[in-house]
Amino acid sequence: MSNRASSRLTEGEIYSRKELQKLFQTNDATIKNGVFPLKGYDSILLFVTENKPKDRTQYVDLLDDGILYWDGQKAGKTDRKIIEHEANGIELLVFYRKSKQEHPDSGFRYEGRFRYISHRGAHPAHFVLQHIPGATQRAPRQVREEPESYSPRPADPTQETPYYREGRLIQGLTTRHERNRALRKAAIHIHGTRCQVCDLALAELYGPLAGDYIEVHHKNPVAGYTGEVVVNPATDMAVLCPNCHRMLHHNRKEPISVEELRAIVQANRKSSTNQRRLM
């Protein structure tokens, strides 16, 4: 029978490392590390600080809407434990803070259980982990007072809807990279019109209105070009539906790859299917 540390934690609560040592009755000094396999439990504790002190290795870590973009250890000694955690029956518990000074006693906010989605590179490997909704979500979320996606509220006839101004003309000079229209046609000719992330062909949903419409994505962002480059439409381009294309560009601070987004979509579909089976 598994012994999971998550059953003794509450999402949204702040925990210092000393409090966790007391809670789990451990004096193991390696709890100071970012990756801490908790002895006696089928759990790995991940301690993540977004903004590192200048004297520490500047790993790139970011938690955004339940997706954790996280750099593993430079030596890579714990990478397999993260990648194979589900197969080994181990849960990943994420403790996150913006900076060391964010919470009292250098504490972390417990974000809950996460699952491995994908990784790329090595030394350090760049991981994508996803939050798993659980029964311990009792504390109010502090990131947002209200989720961005929610059901519309009934109209209140006693309240006047506010008006907003826009449309003023603004003149300016911009410099942008030239786009090659032939490249788009070549990419569609090679990859077709089915989204390479979610597998949707827009015509299946919208019929003749969509026709053969699909969007084309540069795997290497055009904004990063320093001059004219040679682009291979077979390997450097992808075809995406508008939703998936928007998601790839949603987080400009830590963009993800087509392969990483595909893994996220597949994991969510699998999770939704399993939940429906349990209902």
Image (tube, rainbow, N blue to C red):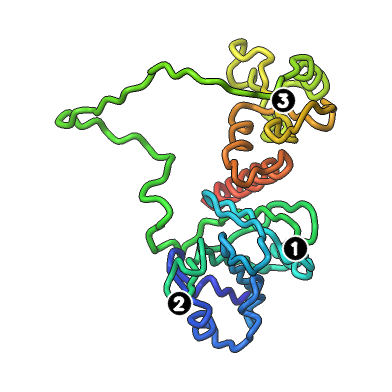
Residue in view at x 66 percent, y 53 percent: 128
Q: Is residue 85 above or below residue 230?
A: below
Tell me the residue at 70%/24% (across/down).
216
Is residue 144 something that shows in the picture? yes
Q: Residue furthest top?
A: 208
Q: Quadrant of the N terminus?
A: bottom right
Q: Is residue 110 left or right of residue 200?
A: left
Give the amino acid type for the residue marked by disc 2 in the picture: Asp
Label 2: which residue?
Answer: 105
Q: Looking at numbered disc 3 in the image, what kind of residue is underneath it? A: Arg
Mark 3 residue element: loop
Q: Earlier in the sequence, mark 2 or mark 3?
A: 2
Q: Which residue is mark 1?
A: 84
- Foreground mark, 2 or 1, reads 2
Q: Could you tell me residue 194's position as x and y percent?
A: 72, 25
Res. 1 in view: no
Quarter of the view holding residue 139: bottom left
Q: Percent from the top left, x then y, of residue 84?
A: 75, 63
Can you identify the residue that label 3 sits on?
194
Q: Quadrant of residue 59?
A: bottom right
Question: Closer to us: mark 2 or mark 3?
Answer: 2
Residue 252 percent across, percent down from the top left: 59, 41
Q: Residues within 10 Å of mark 2 (few under 14, many from 20)?
A: some
Circle nearer the N terminus (3, 1)? 1
The answer for how far apart the CA atoms under marks 3 and 1 are is 31 Å
Q: Label 2, label 3: how many angstroms apart (C-alpha)? A: 51 Å
